[in-house]
Amino acid sequence: MLLATIAFAAFISTMMGGMLALKLRDRLHLILGFSAGAVIGVAFFDLLPEALELSEHSSASSTIVSWTAFGFLLYLVTDRVLQFHVGAPVRDAHTVKRGFFGAAILCIHSFLDGVAIGLGFQASHAVGMVVAIAVLTHDFSDGINTMNIVTKNSGARRQALFWLLIDAIAPVAGVAATLLFTLPSSQFGVVLALFAGFFLYIGASDLIPESYHAHPKFLTTAMTLAGAAVLYLAMALVAHAGTVTVAGLEVDQTAQVDASTLVLNGAGKRTKYFFDVYVAALYVPAHRGDAAQVLDDAGPKRITMMLMRNLSAEQLSDALREGISLNSTPAELASVQTQTDALVAIMNMIGSAAKGDLLAIDFLADGTTRVALNGRPRGNPIAGVEFQRALLKVWLGSKPVQSDLKRALLGG
């Protein structure tokens, strides 16, 4: 029911944007200027960052940026093919086709918006709501952009309304489509990067030049900047809505571990001798209120520590080694000694960590453990399911590093 409501809201938002563009057609250059900023804003502030985040562990950032460049160049070539092969006698037909092509790209993007909502809710309710907010914030400008792309390229009112309706239906169809398939996050990141390139071309090479043609440049420029600013503010609000504040620090409500989107199970502050040490957060596939359930869950998990003071490599490794020792029998400790030594070696490799650094420990479903500092992997993955369990017990065991922190990580 919630998904249906969100899909209907996306439909209405798109239609309202398109009808506004149609009503203010006599000031189309201003609407086009705003649309140009909005389209470029979607690419820079929404699509590209999301693509980089989804592909964090599966593709290098340079690869994602390359896909964006490929999308830009692919759209350019396709647009030029339409332009040069239609011929001068049917120039009007060319411009109409160009408008239809741009509208089709926008509709496919709207379809992917719906797919993102559906996949978000497949991961968890919290993830789905964050994605839905992001989609609804720019669906209104999607409607404006679709209407403008068609009308400025000699499309009739009837044709523009047809494409607007298709664009409004597209996110609904995308939500429905996720009932039939699941797209790995790494592949979805590539798709988003590709469409970021499409949007950059549409905004920079199509909408901006058209909006500037024979119109006051100052006001049009202001509208372009306003369009980009609105999208930036919308994405900033969405990002803020996707966090919770713990001890004055913002903690993300979701975490991407390879192809899995995890949800925040709980977060709390670690203190020692009246000193604030770090804010820890636990991410799991689905909320768990019992430590045994988290420890027995074979799915991926993540522990993050946002440092509230500078720590040396020795302090980091000693704290983890002590926590493992306190929650393990001598036999268990012996069985994970090699992995514990490997973890200590990684901490020594990291050296000191500064206040504000984010240390993340990923517990993968294949039984390996991965360490990263500020998003950069450190050392080699450490194999062993029993080691994962022993390390998690540092915070969730019978003798946790801090009892009230354990309760906080379990949502208490």
Image: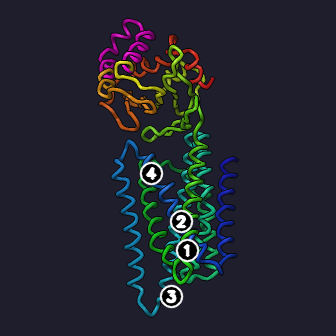
Residue 134 counted in the magenta span: no
Amino acid type at mark 1: Phe
Q: Which residue is mark 1?
A: 218
* Along the viewing direction, whichever of 122 and 351 lies nearer the viewer: 351
Q: Which residue is mark 3?
A: 92
Image coordinates of residue 3 in percent, x first then y, are: 65, 49
* Along the viewing direction, whichever of 33 and 25 lies nearer the viewer: 33
Q: Which residues are magenta?
A: 316-343
Q: Residue at x 45, y 11 (%)?
A: 327
Q: Which residue is mark 4?
A: 51
Q: Earlier in the sequence, mark 3 or mark 2?
A: 2
Of all residues shown, which one is farthest toward the bottom?
Answer: 89
Of tags 1 and 3, the one toward the viewer is 1
Q: Which residue is mark 2?
A: 37
Of tags 1 and 4, the one toward the viewer is 1
Q: Are marks 3 and 2 in contact (CB under 8 Å)?
A: no
* C-alpha distance separating marks 1 and 4: 33 Å
